[in-house]
Every structure is written in C-alpha cells, then in structure tokens.
Amino acid sequence: MTKSFDILIVGIGGQGTILASNILGEACLFEGRHVKGAETHGMAQRGGSVETHIRIDGLYGPLIVPGTADLLISFDLLEALRYSHYLKTGGKMVVNRHMVLPTSAFTQKSPLPTEGEVTAQLAPFDPCLIDADRIATEAGSSLAQNVVILGAASGSIPLKSESLLTAVKKLVPPRTVEANVKAFEMGQTFGRTC
C-alpha cells in the first residue's frame, strides 16, 4: 500500500475550507500526483462545522482515519480542538487564532471556552497559531484568510509552492488574484516561523 500524505481541513461554513481543499487538489493535478478528497458540509450555510479530507498519493479511500492525519489545517480555534484527535503523533497543526461563536459544537447549555482555554488544550500539539484576519487584511482582502492559512501550512505540504500559487490564481475570483497571491506569500512567510 502506498503511504499517503493526509490533510484534514476544518472550519465553519463560509470560511473557505472547500476552496482551500480545491486549491490543494488542483496543485496535485498540476504535479501529476494522485489525490483523493471528501468533504462534509451539510450545515455549512448555518455556521456549522465543515471538514475536508485530502489524501495525496494514497490509493485507498478518501477518508482519513482518526489519529493518522499528517497535517490539520483549522480556520477556527474551536474546530481545531474538535478535530485534534485526527492528528497523528508528530503531525503538524496550523490554526487560525480566530474563534467563530457560536459553533454547532456548543449550545446555550454548555459554556463556551475562552481563546486562552482552547489554546491551552491545543498546546500539546504545538500548533502554529496565526492571526489570519490581520494578515489577510494587510494583503488586501479579509476574505483571503483561508489562503493565508494555506500559505502558512504550505511548508508542511509535499507540493511545490509554485503549484499551490498556480492553483490559487486559477481558482479564486479573477478580481481577487493579486490579494490572494499576496495573502498566500505572507502566510508562507509566517509559516516559516512556526
């Protein structure tokens, strides 16, 4: 069996998890790599949890088994915590410091944790925590947070930066290409510090 590189991307509906997974898939196609993917986004439009599984160079099945993901990319702190059990020992976690409230994980009956409480619970995973909103805004579009995070994670992904950037240029709306390219590059620079 060929060993795949498994990436789980998680977030809240509307944060761009599907676009990020499409960028990864497209970059794989540019490089002639085998890729499988699956997504769950039934409640995405209502602020629910969204997850996408990307398996690069794997031959079997698109779903990642808990405890085996090489990389967890999370667009939300709470979603990183919710899906942290998917990360394998020694895996990498890249997380947006932002927390969308409320998420489907919590109700009015259960108290919402603070950002500090969530980051403390994530500490054993040694996450790369990034302020994607600030960086995306500096790049020219606060909507490019997903591309910032993808850039920050790119050093851990077995794909060429050129392939990822080509996929970004192809898949984002034409009027946002410049801001998204800058967002990816700024995220990539930040990711080198993690």
Image: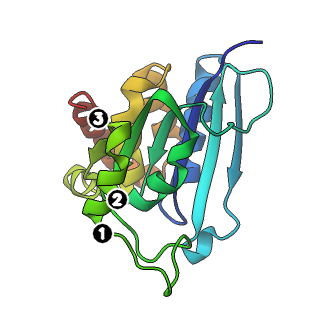
Secondary structure state at the residue bearing disc 3: helix
**Residue indicated by mark 1:** 114
**Residue indicated by mark 3:** 185
**Residue indicated by mark 2:** 118
The percent coordinates of residue 30 (x first, y second) are: 59, 22
What residue is at 48 percent from the left and 57 percent from the top?
79
Is 118 displayed left or right of 49 in the figure?
left
Q: Would you call the spot at circle 3 few (<14 residues within 10 Å), some (14-19), or many (20 or more)?
A: many
Secondary structure state at the residue bearing disc 1: loop
In the image, 189 versus 143, the foreground residue is: 189
The percent coordinates of residue 51 (x first, y second) are: 61, 52
Location of the C terminus by quadrant is top left
In the image, 16 versus 74, the foreground residue is: 74
Q: Which label's residue is closer to the chain start, 1 or 3?
A: 1
**Given contact means CB atoms under 8 Å apart, are the residues at marks 2 and 1 in contact?**
yes
Residue 42: name its quadrant: bottom right
What residue is at 52 percent from the left and 82 percent from the top?
107
Is 89 displayed left or right of 100 in the figure?
right
Is 154 displayed left or right of 188 in the figure?
right
Residue 43: name its quadrant: bottom right
Of the residues shown, which amino acid type is indicated by label 1? Thr
